[in-house]
Amino acid sequence: MGSDENQAPQAAPRDEKDRVVIFDTTLRDGEQCPGATMTFDEKLEVAELLDEMGVDIIEAGFPIASQGDFESVQEIARRAENSVICGLARAQMKDIDVCAEAIKPAKRGRIHTFIGTSPLHRKYQMGIEKAEVLERVTASVTRARGHTDDVEWSAMDATRTEADFLCACVEAAIKAGATTVNIPDTVGYATPDEFAGLIRMLMERVPGADEIVFSTHCHNDLGLAVANSLSGVGAGARQVECAVNGLGERAGNAALEEIVMAIHTRADAMRVWTGIDTTMLTRASKLVSRVTAFPVQYNKAIVGRNAFAHESGIHQDGMLKHAGTFEIMTPESVGLKESSLVMGKHSGRHAFREKLKELGYELGGNAFEDAFVRFKALADAKKHVYDEDIEALVDQEIASAHDRIKVVALTVIAGTGGPQKATITLDVDGKQHTHEAVGDGPVDATFRAIRAWCPEARLALYQVSAVTEGTDAQAEVMVRLEADGKIATGRGSDTDTMVASARAYVSALNKLMARGARRKPETMLAS
Ligand SMILES: CC(=O)SCCNC(=O)CCNC(=O)[C@H](O)C(C)(C)COP(=O)(O)OP(=O)(O)OC[C@H]1O[C@@H](n2cnc3c(N)ncnc32)[C@H](O)[C@@H]1OP(=O)(O)O
Ligand SMILES: CC(C)C(=O)C(=O)O
Ligand SMILES: [Mg+2]
């Protein structure tokens, strides 16, 4: 398990026998999940990207399903530059012939035909006995081979099929000319050890097994799709069927990006490789998410927005010192520009200082500590701390560094009951003073409480805006005061609009005093 000190993958062995063929079924099984339907143009866009990305086989659709499916498979077949274009067909002659017609324009086309082999599927879905299943396997593969020499056969519900019967079906498919045999875990029932055992058993027992490629097609009902697929690869399967973002029936298929990056990142352990350009994975994920309108889970491996984001101080500190401390892949390797250090309640001083630097601030000793304390308080009160929040906070820190009056505490009683009342404690040159006032609304009450000992300033402007989004956004308040012919504008920010208002008012007062427009604070006290 020991890993190198950086995230660079071990040099992968590039022997053809160790190549894992990536079969993408986003446009077929992926589209089968409720709500994921894609338009003709969207399918072409996805297929183009998969083709460019190095996907070996694109399962473009199920041509018998509809005229639309037929046409999109045909157009994808026409346009594909590199990938083999595959269509799905039941064990029915018409399905196979229509599929053959759809993939005809492809440089390289594949027919993928399947039939249910398990007792449940034989009895309830098709109402046929084992012998008839075997006959249909032979007939369908033979028919498909009449159209192309690239034929894949799948045993639907293979993992719940009797071992002997599954061997007989696989043997019949190989004898009829199947070049790839797919072993689907159609209902996501297998465990990794079981699945590996199944592949191994088929490879050992079925005559001709060494002539064909075994494939996995694992569903994610128990969250094991990727683990089962990789277990299959460990046992000798050399094709993995998967879908971008893990799209697919019910809980989905194995996620393409996870399969590819597991193989890429742990080439040292798995000793296999794929031909995928991993730097296109993020683009593919975003595209599929956009066209299906299926959001990607934030903490989804590889392509989730948190996959390369760090909020906690210890991790951020590690990342700043060496990215290998908390990342096993580089963001660039999946097509992201960089990792992100997200500022939040778990962040520490190292990351905060780095963020300030990035925003163009250089705060020394106490100012830095004060800003950090205020940042932590803000992060405790607020879900997302944006750069603008930090800027507002630091600007205020800098602006108030030499202030003689500071807001220490504020309590406001507001609501429909009235009258609104504010109690404010101010620190004036190191001495604390508390005043209380009622007003026409909470802001008026707050300003009156402040004015209780400095009545001359005239309020020329009061303006509130939100620094960022959400109900927990910081309010930024601007207050303009006029006294003795001088004008000063103060700003205050806080998640509490009243506190921001008091800070803005006091900030304007401080500026007026600094300009000599006011008497000294101690002489201003009303009592
Ligand atoms: C595990 C999988 O992902 S399998 C693929 C699932 N994908 C889809 O079904 C999407 C596209 N499907 C469709 O558009 C339609 O189901 C069609 C066009 C294929 C068939 O439509 P219909 O003829 O109206 O049949 P319907 O879907 O209601 O029932 C399926 C029929 O296919 C049969 N069938 C199912 N799988 C197979 C198979 N592999 N080989 C042969 N017959 C099969 C069923 O037994 C049933 O036959 P019956 O009508 O004799 O009872
Ligand atoms: C058609 C087959 C391969 C399938 O999608 C499944 O069994 O899940
Ligand atoms: Mg499936």
Image (spheres, grey):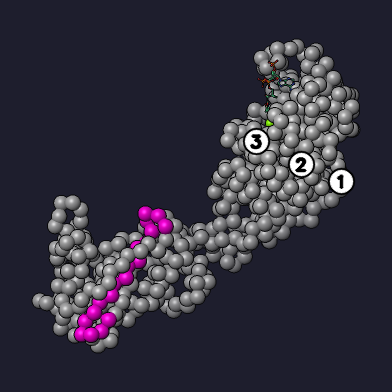
**Is 138 drawn above or below residue 63 in the view shown?**
above
| Residue at figure coordinates x 76%, y 55% from the top left | 10
Q: Nearer the viewer, residue 353 or 50?
A: 50
Q: Nearer the viewer, residue 301 or 369?
A: 301
Q: CA distance from mark 2 to mark 1?
A: 27 Å
The amino acid type found where label 1 is placed reads Glu
Left or right placement of residue 299 versus residue 77 in this view: left
Residue located beneath label 3 in the image: 31
- Residue 34 location, quadrant: top right
Asked if residue 34 lies in the magenta stretch, the reply is no
Residue 181 position, x and y percent, is 81, 30
| Residue at figure coordinates x 56%, y 52% from the top left | 305
- Residue 336 location, quadrant: bottom right
Of pointers 2 and 1, the one earlier in the residue sequence: 1
Residue 478 position, x and y percent, is 32, 70
Left or right placement of residue 483 versus residue 343 in this view: left
Q: Which residues are magenta?
A: 469-487
Q: CA distance from mark 3 to mark 1?
A: 31 Å
Specify whether residue 32 is in view: yes
- Label ID, residue 76: 2
Check the image and name the residue furthest to the bottom.
516
Residue located beneath label 1 in the image: 16
> Do tag 2 and tag 1 residues touch (Cβ < 8 Å)?
no
Q: Nearer the viewer, residue 128 or 328?
A: 128
Residue 413 position, x and y percent, is 19, 57
- Label ID, residue 227: none
- Crowd rating for badge 2 (residues with CA inside 10 Å; few <14, some 14–19, many 20+): many
Residue 362 position, x and y percent, is 47, 78
